[in-house]
Image: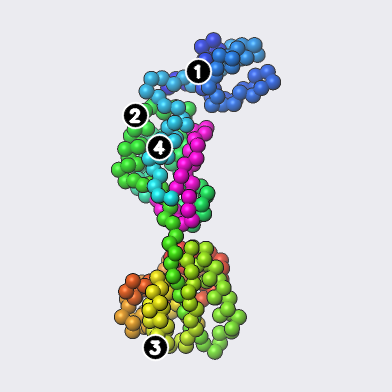
Amino acid sequence: MKFGDIPVGQATGAILAHSLRVGDETFKKGRTLSDSDVSALVAAGFQSVMGVQLESGDIDENTAAARIAASVAGESVTLTTARTGRCNITATERGVVVLDPEGIDSLNLIDESVTLSTIAPFTAVEAGDMVATVKIITFGVAEAVIAQCETAAQASAPLVRVASYGPKKIGLIQTILPVLRQKVIDKATSVTRARVAALGGSLIDDIHCGHKAEDVAASLKKLQSAECDIALVLGASAIADRRDVIPAAVEQCGGTVEHLGMPVDPGNLMMLATMGKMHVLGIPGSARSPRLHGFDWVL
């Protein structure tokens, strides 16, 4: 690829590097100059223009962007038409963005003319949201560079995909203590229902029980019998130890407490557990608020 000052008489087929005002018209950068464009430049008094001339083995920026975007795209995403060296990758379904960071880094280190940028991993997206973009920095790229990028992408494909939400059945258990007001319980139900619906799931039960291990265990067994995929346990009092009420209830049911605590605030006091095929999430009182919470990421 040649870049530099090009005599107007030799500029047919060149790609304009900078926008120019030519008579009453603006020639925007990236424009491929035609014979009539050159005539207009001559008439306007231009002696030369700053531009790019692709050589044998070069690929224009739009073709390059489209090829690389196609090589990195996985499930539940689609590509926009490449323009100005940019091809966007957008979601086709609601879900969370799943990336291969090492693969993306490897691709971005191949050549400075090629960039793949993304939104944060595990971001929740709607259909139509942009999740990544391929931008070609220069007006053309060597075919060998594009081929190297495609090979790198396919080695660990897909680099960019959306994991769509499944229609999960979710049950909510709220433990009750005398200090807990009814409006607080009702708010927790409505907020949780909205959270679940936003992820494509359905809240099939909202059980209220005493804040005792045996009561929580009975409620968990009820949700398990209903073939819930996920049981959410919102305690009237937050989990303080693996021997506390909610973890003890899981173990009474033959389940396993996988982890207690999470390095996310709000959401530090979450519990992750399993009972057979059913996931059990012990969630802290702060999850009664609709604001972004560590619980949202886990759910």
- Residue 294 among those drawn in magenta: no
Q: Amino acid at mark 4?
A: Ile
Q: Position of residue 172 (x, y in %)?
A: 47, 76
According to the image, label 2 marks what residue?
Answer: 144
Residue 148 appearing in the image: yes
Q: Position of residue 191 (x, y in %)?
A: 56, 71
Compute the Cα span from label 4 to label 3. 57 Å
Residue annotated with mark 4:
68
Q: Which mark is residue 214?
A: 3
Q: Looking at the image, is mark 4 or mark 1 earlier in the sequence?
A: 1
Query: Which residue carries the number 1 mark?
Result: 13
Boundaries of the magenta span: 77-99
Q: Residue at x 57, y 73 (%)?
A: 190
Q: Is residue 64 left or right of residue 147?
A: right
Q: Is residue 236 above or below residue 294?
A: below
Disc 1 marks which amino acid? Answer: Gly
Q: Secondary structure at mark 1?
A: loop
Horizontal relation, residue 179 to residue 201: left or right: right
